Structures are given as C-alpha cells and as structure tokens.
Image (tube, helix red, strand yellow):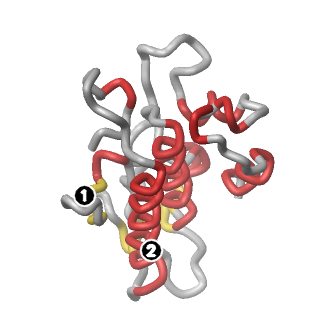
C-alpha cells in the first residue's frame, strides 16, 4: 500500500482521498463486526496499518488475530490482561492499566485514520523531535490544514481530539 509518503518512489503518487476513506470505512466495518455483530464480542487488540490487507479494488480484510481477546461479557466493562499490541497504536489507558475494552480498538482505529489522513506513520524516528509520534504531533496542531495542506481539510480539530479522548 502506498500510503506513507516515505515509501513512495519519485514516479509514484500517494493514494487518493477517496481510496484512503474507502480503506478507513472498510477497517471501521471490520471493527464494528468484531465489536457489535458477533457474540461474544472480540477485541482485536492489534489494529494497525500493517494488519489491514487490501485487494486490487482496495477492499479491506483485517488480518493477524493472534492478540485478539473475547470481549467483556455480561455486566463486565473490561477484560484484565497483560498489555499487548503495537507501540504507537496502543491506547494509553490500556497500556497503563491492563484493562482492555473495545475503546482500545477505537483508539487504534483513530491512529490508523490519522495515518490515512496525513500519509505519516504512527512512529517515524526520521522526523524531527516533536513530530516523531503521530498522535502527539497532531495533538499540538491548531489548524487541520497543517496535517496535510493539499487535502484542504475543513473539520474542527477540537471535535476530532474530543472524540479521541473518549
């Protein structure tokens, strides 16, 4: 997938906005299926761009369920477990507490969505200090056009970050 700007050859173009959003919707539907359509629910625990497989039409298939856990059942709100996942995609509250909820996957989806919007990796140590960790970098931005100026994004970053904090 030619999502990340650093992976492009000079003669290649990045994915179109339409294709990026098609991938985002496909990943969201996969997570929705795991969380809402099957019983008991499944917490994926390793949603990241590398685990999103694409066919030639950019249809999404989630892969690598090795870290997946059966979600909380009954009146339980979380599953207590050893913290697993990929750094840069792992929800901070899960990393600090070991309490796994479906919100952990939602945080990871948010990171993937930021990658799709920005064309940057979750962690890129070749970037200058302050820009190496995608979520931290984006949280410091006041104007969404700083993320990817050529997209002319026109959504309110305050609302976007509020959704991340839930």
Residue appearing at x 39%, y 28% in the figure: 5
Q: Distance between the residues labelled 1 and 2?
A: 26 Å
Residue annotated with mark 1 = 54
Instruction: Give left or right: position of 26 versus 60.
Output: right
Residue appearing at x 53%, y 27% in the figure: 133
Image coordinates for residue 150, horizontal then vertical, percent: 57, 34
Residue appearing at x 40%, y 85% in the figure: 40
Does label 1 or label 2 sit earlier along the sequence? 1
Q: Give the farthest residue toward the top.
A: 128
Image coordinates for residue 49, horizontal then vertical, percent: 35, 47
Instruction: Give left or right: position of 158 versus 56.
Output: right
Q: Give the farthest residue toward the front.
A: 11
Q: Dot 2, crowdedness within 10 Å: few (<14), some or many (≥20)?
A: many
In the picture, residue 38 is in which quadrant?
bottom left
Q: Nearer the viewer, residue 46 or 84?
A: 46
**Secondary structure found at label 1:** strand
Residue annotated with mark 2 = 71
Residue appearing at x 49%, y 55% in the figure: 109
């Amino acid at each position: 997938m030619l999502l990340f700007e650093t992976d492009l050859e000079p003669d290649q173009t990045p994915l179109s906005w339409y294709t990026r959003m098609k991938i985002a919707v496909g990943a969201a539907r996969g997570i929705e299926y795991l969380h809402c359509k099957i019983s008991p629910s499944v917490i994926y625990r390793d949603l990241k761009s590398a685990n999103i497989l694409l066919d030639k039409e950019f249809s999404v298939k989630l892969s690598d369920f090795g870290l997946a856990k059966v979600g909380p059942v009954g009146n339980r709100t979380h599953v207590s477990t050893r913290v697993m996942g990929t750094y840069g995609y792992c929800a901070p509250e899960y990393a600090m507490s070991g309490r796994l909820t479906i919100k952990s996957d939602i945080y990871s989806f948010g990171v993937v969505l930021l990658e799709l919007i920005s064309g940057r990796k979750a962690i890129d140590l070749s970037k200058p200090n302050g820009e190496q960790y995608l979520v931290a970098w984006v949280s410091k931005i006041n104007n969404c056009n700083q993320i990817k100026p050529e997209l002319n994004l026109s959504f309110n970053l305050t609302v976007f970050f509020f959704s991340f904090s839930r």
